[in-house]
């Protein structure tokens, strides 16, 4: 168990911090145009090193030297010339164990020189929207010998997906004023290596959507459902944590395909959203169900063909009892397990044999080569109001810790976003 | 848990008793030439009914009416004309809970008329070899409301795979003297519906091999490894219960492909077989290892690409910690769980997300369309001694219960066979 607890967080970090990872002999990097760059290496080890190199180059922004305080000028968000600004940041106090608390974080303000170093190929960005995602829990724990990448560093700003405006660019793919999304610090200004970010071209949609529907969670839902679940028209689909950033979209993609879709969530308000806003065929509040398997049997009298797994533990056990022959379980996340010292045991795994069930873990980075195709599909859906999307918006970086911690108590209704600046 | 325990056995029964099953809108029947017949149905329900019909028609042979005792003639194994014989049978006394015991079975002898009813399209066979397989445990428990097919019936002979000689045939595909393998009663003579059996054409190999290497376990190893594991040359493969009927073959198929193969088993003798008879690169006795994960780490310092799962429970938990990115787990069986009232919990499932692990349950019946291809591959391997194969042979039907029960205590070394008659 100790091995496992240590292993999970660091691997998540590796994937979500960098936008770089290693697949077999191939190192993957997402470039500024949203295209996936691949670097084929002679050996698997070389690929791991290559992706690790990108990881090393992706340093979170840190306060510049104290001496620059004396060079303070009037700050300008439009351009700079070494203008000084204050940079509010969300700092991790210490490694987290168990459920995260607001007091695990503190808000600090540092002085920050709005200028890139000479010859830098990075970009200096102003962060507009930050994304609260369950995987971030995995980066809050202690680093481990099994680490593929660093956990968050106590005393430094935490990192996450965000939408940002370029203030200054040393990278040929970006210029001042461009918008991008990708991993940034939880702070007002960051310096990022743009290989790990997507340039935003469509700006006649709410920019915050690039933290969700048009960003990592949207792509997760799209690829997870269409590429991992192998769905067919008429099949039955169950989505747990269904009102969240990913779940609400999976359900709608499944409905578009002609599936029968049921979701579960943790409040009456969320269940109402599922049924009346997102168009799920049925929904239930898992907290009201003494017997999860019976609830699923009620909703799926003929069984479940596809389960989109966001929860794990007891929910997975109940689902296994209700899966159909040749069923598919796409494992996107297991939020019920992230804060536990000892993960719950799943007992009903023998059923996967005779039911020929496929359980497939996946990470969205493996599918970013389909991001352009995804945008071509989803942006018209937004404009034609074929997709409903609900955000839970926290105003101001100082509200970030509360919003982030709230994820693990199910406080958010819809995609949890933190507004840093509306420009 | 109760739901699961009930569900597992009946589904297994359905699959292994009949040789008929339902896949989507398709009912599958294995015919006498070893070819898979498919019957496409308008609806899934129709397909289920069609495969159930075959199941119903596949009645185990039962003692004929007592009055036929008065018609007793001299028995002839070559032919008959209503000859009477005694038929020794292995009877299930009552449903089994927990580990099966020899006393759960009794040997009885009944009178048996060696003649098919007028107009029958069945075949009357003399059973030569019977197969002891772990899945049979799932048929010994109580029937359940979730039953897809019947459990063994207390007071009746149990059923299993066997190799048999046709004494009389009412079926156009079979004639007297033919050999076949498939599901028969644990008895000296059975009447079977031959749609569920494979005719044996190659007889210059030991006939008992059709209970193992050339039968269901061989096909399980072949399809499970090549079709489910998606193996590539140079990958690392771990096989649990590796000296058993399936495991010993999976290891050898993996070696033929150029994989690095490690197996585990439960005694020094078995480990020695793995290393020195079956050509595994390494092997360990799981009973000697206090920390299974550490044992796997020692054998696979660079991790496991493929796990062929025969065991479940703690072993699966340890494997999950040692799997590589994009690893595959083919779930053939979970023998450690079959006799437990409450199945063990598996705790390390979150690792399947970031490692993108695929866990795929499978049943050999889905792959019997490849049986001819398998024989074309494997029979030359046997003749050229490219495959080693070890059987554990119990002589005499009366030794059947001991041999069968022994499976669940790991007493067998190699494929457990019961010799009913050597003709």
Image (tube, coloured by chain):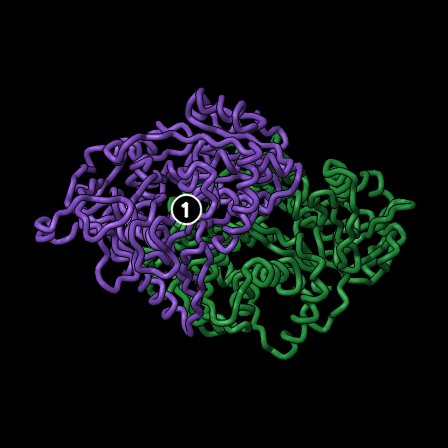
Chain colours: A purple, B green
Residue B356 percent coordinates (x, y): 45, 53
Q: Is residue B395 visible?
A: no
Q: Position of A272 compared to A130: left or right?
A: right
Q: Residue furthest right?
A: B119
Residue A399 falls left or right of residue B175 = left
Say which quarter of the image contains residue A171: bottom left
Image location of residue A259, percent across then percent down = 62, 35
Residue at left offset 51%, top offset 71% = B233
Q: Nearer the viewer, residue A214 or A55?
A: A214
Is A340 on the left-hand or right-hand side of B244? left
Q: Quadrant of the C terminus of chain B?
A: bottom right
**Around disc 1, counting alpha carbons within 10 Å, would you say few (fewer than 14), some (14 to 19), or many (20 or more)?**
many
Using the image as rendered, state which of residue A160 and residue B235 is in the foreground: A160
- Percent coordinates x, y for residue B418 in the rendering: 62, 58
Q: Is residue A54 above or below residue A68?
A: below
Q: Does the rendering let one see residue A303?
A: yes
Residue B131 in which image quadrant: bottom right
Provide residue B351's location: percent of width, then percent of height: 39, 50
Q: Residue at x 38, y 44 (%)?
A: B347
Residue where numbered disc 1 is placed? B349
The subunit letter for the residue under badge 1 reads B
Q: Nearer the viewer, residue A214 or A218?
A: A214
Q: Secondary structure at mark 1?
A: loop
């Amino acid at each position: 168990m100790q091995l496992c607890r240590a292993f999970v967080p660091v691997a998540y970090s590796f994937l979500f911090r960098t936008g770089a990872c290693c697949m077999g002999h191939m190192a993957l990097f997402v470039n500024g145009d949203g295209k996936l760059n691949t670097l084929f290496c002679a050996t698997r080890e070389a690929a791991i090193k290559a992706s690790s190199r990108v990881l090393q180059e992706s340093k979170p922004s840190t306060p510049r030297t104290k001496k620059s305080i004396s060079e303070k000028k009037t700050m300008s968000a439009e351009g700079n010339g070494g203008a000084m600004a204050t940079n509010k940041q969300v700092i991790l106090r210490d490694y987290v164990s168990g459920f995260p608390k607001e007091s695990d974080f503190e808000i600090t303000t540092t002085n920050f020189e709005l200028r890139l170093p000479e010859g830098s190929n990075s970009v200096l960005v102003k962060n507009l929207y930050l994304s609260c995602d369950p995987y971030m829990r995995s980066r809050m724990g202690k680093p481990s010998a099994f680490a593929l990448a660093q956990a968050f560093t106590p005393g430094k700003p935490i990192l996450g997906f965000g939408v940002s405006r370029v203030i200054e660019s040393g990278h040929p793919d970006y210029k001042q004023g461009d918008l991008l999304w990708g991993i940034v610090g939880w702070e007002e200004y960051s310096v990022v290596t743009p290989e790990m970010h997507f340039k935003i071209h469509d700006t006649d949609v709410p920019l915050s959507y690039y933290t969700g529907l048009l960003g990592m969670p949207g792509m997760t839902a799209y690829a997870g459902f269409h590429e991992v679940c192998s769905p067919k028209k008429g099949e039955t689909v169950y989505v747990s944590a269904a009102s969240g950033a990913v779940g609400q979209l999976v359900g709608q993609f499944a409905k578009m395909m002609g599936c029968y879709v049921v979701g579960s969530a943790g409040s009456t308000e969320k269940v109402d959203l599922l049924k009346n806003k997102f168009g799920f065929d049925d929904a239930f509040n898992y907290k009201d169900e003494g017997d999860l398997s019976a609830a699923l049997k009620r909703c799926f009298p003929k069984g479940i063909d596809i389960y989109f797994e966001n929860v794990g533990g007891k929910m997975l056990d109940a689902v296994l009892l209700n899966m159909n022959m040749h069923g598919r379980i796409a494992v996107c996340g297991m939020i019920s397990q992230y804060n536990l010292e000892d993960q719950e045991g799943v007992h009903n795994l023998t059923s996967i044999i005779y039911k020929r069930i496929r359980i497939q873990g996946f990470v969205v980075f493996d599918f970013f080569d389909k991001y352009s195709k995804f945008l071509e599909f989803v942006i018209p859906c937004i404009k034609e109001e074929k997709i409903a999307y609900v955000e839970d918006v926290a105003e101001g970086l100082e509200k970030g810790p509360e919003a982030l911690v709230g994820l693990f108590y199910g406080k958010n209704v819809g995609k949890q976003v933190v507004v840093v600046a509306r420009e």
